[in-house]
Amino acid sequence: MVQYTLAQKPELILTVAGKDSPKARDKAMAELVNLMDKGELEAELADGFSPDQLIPVSDRPMPTGDQITQAVQVLSSLALLKAKVQEMRTEALKVRQKVDLLFSDAPISPEDLTTLQEGFKLLKNFAQVNARYQEARTQAETARQILDQALQQETTP
């Protein structure tokens, strides 16, 4: 068995029988075309693609110990930020509903006004944490790929 990937989509693994050869690359190309025809793969292959552009998986560089440690730290940070966002979301949405009162012609009760004034800080904090979470999520994609590569390396004889 030989596995190939694409430079444009390194998380995609195409597995075909045999060893790296023109025939195996043709089989992988057929599998790639099949995935694209089914709509399961949206690769940007604007300049076309040839079997020579397939990258054997064994040729991909394996992550180092430092990269793996950093990847785990990034994923751990993402988990903490996600928990914080989930914890703050309900309260932030309650305050956000009160913001709509500012734009209506109806009078605002003193309780609602107090809730709004106290809630603006919560909204600001939630927005900042959510922005950090979104940024961390983008970074975590790379970390997840590094970890997947390392785990695949561990299980491959």
Image: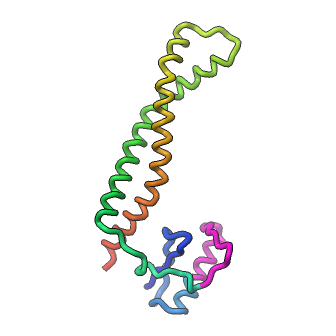
At 51% from the left and 77% from the top, the residue drawn is 14
Magenta region, residue range: 29-50
Question: Relative to 120, is 46 above or below?
Answer: below
Q: Is residue 138 left or right of residue 31?
A: left
- The image quadrant where one finds the N terminus is bottom left
In the rendered image, residue 147, in percent from the top left (x then y), is placed at: 37, 63
- Locate residue 137, reporting x and y percent: 47, 50
Q: Is residue 105 left or right of residue 14?
A: right
Residue 64, horizontal then vertical, whole percent: 32, 68
Position of the C terminus, as image quadrant, is: bottom left
Residue 72 horizontal side relative to residue 5, left or right: left
Q: Quadrant of residue 153?
A: bottom left
Front one among 19 and 78: 78
User: Residue at 34% across / 63% down in the picture?
Assistant: 67
Q: Is residue 75 magenta?
A: no
75, above or below 132, in the image? below
Q: How is the image coloured?
A: rainbow
Q: Nearer the viewer, residue 30 or 115?
A: 115
Return the x and y of residue 15 as percentages of the image width and height.
48, 79
Give residue 81's quadrant in the image: top left
